Amino acid sequence: MNQNLEFNLSQALLSTVSIALAAGDVLREGFSSLAIETQFKTSSIDPVTKYDLASEKIIVDSLRKLFPSHHIIGEEGGDYQPKIKKLAERNYTWHIDPLDGTVNFSHKLPMFCVSIGLLIDDVPSLGVIYNPVTDEMFAAATDIGATLNGEPIHVSQISSVRDALLITGFSYDTHTNDSNINNFIAFQRKAQATRRIGSSALNLCYTATGQLDGYWEMQVKSHDVAAGIVLVREAGGTVTDFDGKDDTFDSGLIVASNGLIHQEMLNIIKITND
């Protein structure tokens, strides 16, 4: 595919699904091994394994072969510059997390995934997220819709936080920074229930399917949420920062919901942090 002549979003989505499947094979193999050796990055609760690295290599090598003029940002390898000089007028940047939920993975908890998102001119435009253990393939692209294993998905119809199942996550500095604890307590008291499963990408997936009604988090990175934002929006939901603006990547703040409870979630966060 020569994206400098024509970039086809539908074809790119199919290609990305194939790449996620290949990366998922590596993670599935690692998950089934007797022991998973881990190293640590920023703290003792921020692990990385050889499977994170192997998955990222598959994804990056595949994307560079298909789209050599595209920019890639990976959780493990950082900034991968285009292999050839950009000829296209539009800006294509891939944001990848080769293993979102490494702590779960290393403890043999099957809640982790491959996450591959594409921003076109800084707008989330394509997202593929794959859990290789449950064999759940989430895929979406702008104006194409969102699917789970090829079937259309849609956000829930819950209209009040008091009836909602919400989810959140905590950053890797949670031992020293409890900035999200107050939000968690506030939602725990307001919502039907709150959860934490340890994967930002899957949080967004299950918001897109309607199994969850809303999600919020602080200190998220682009590779955590780029793909999932597309899924939620294409499934009919809403994604903003804490101020209701489209500034998640710069602020690191995200609220995703079915849209019906979005403003109520923003209000609770504002009251809690004033």
Image (cartoon, rainbow, N blue to C red):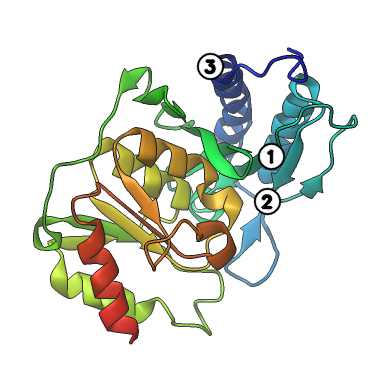
- In which quadrant will I find the C terminus? bottom left
Question: What is the distance, in whole Å, between disc 3 and disc 1 at their CAs?
Answer: 17 Å
Residue of label 2: 75
Q: Under tag 2, what secondary structure?
A: loop
Give how far across and how far down residue 130 sits, in percent. Answer: 48, 32
Q: Quadrant of residue 182?
A: bottom left
- Could you classify mark 2 by the number of other residues whose Cα lies within 10 Å: few (under 14), some (14-19), or many (20 or more)? some
Disc on res. 93: 1
Give the label, 1 or 2, closer to the camera: 1
Q: Image point 15% across, 65% down: which residue?
A: 191
Q: Earlier in the sequence, mark 1 or mark 2?
A: 2
Mark 2 to mark 3: distance in Å? 25 Å
Mark 3 and mark 1 in contact? Answer it, CB < 8 Å.
no
Q: Which quadrant of the structure image shows residue 69? A: top right
Residue at x 25% of width, y 49% of height: 259
Disc 3 marks a residue whose amino acid type is: Ser
Q: Is residue 92 above or below residue 22?
A: below
Q: Measured from the top left, where is residue 6 in percent x and y?
A: 69, 15
Bin the neighbour count of mark 1 within 10 Å (Cα to Cα): few under 14, some 14-19, many 20 and up: many
Kindly identify which residue carries mark 3.
10
- Name the element at disc 1: strand
- Residue type, mark 1 in image: Thr
**Image height of 94 relative to 21, above or below:** below
267 or 180, which lies in front?
267
- At label 2, which amino acid type do we have? Glu
Q: Please name which of the two marks, 2 or 3, marks the residue nearer to the observer.
A: 3
The first of marks 3 and 1 along the sequence is 3
Quadrant in the picture for residue 197: bottom left
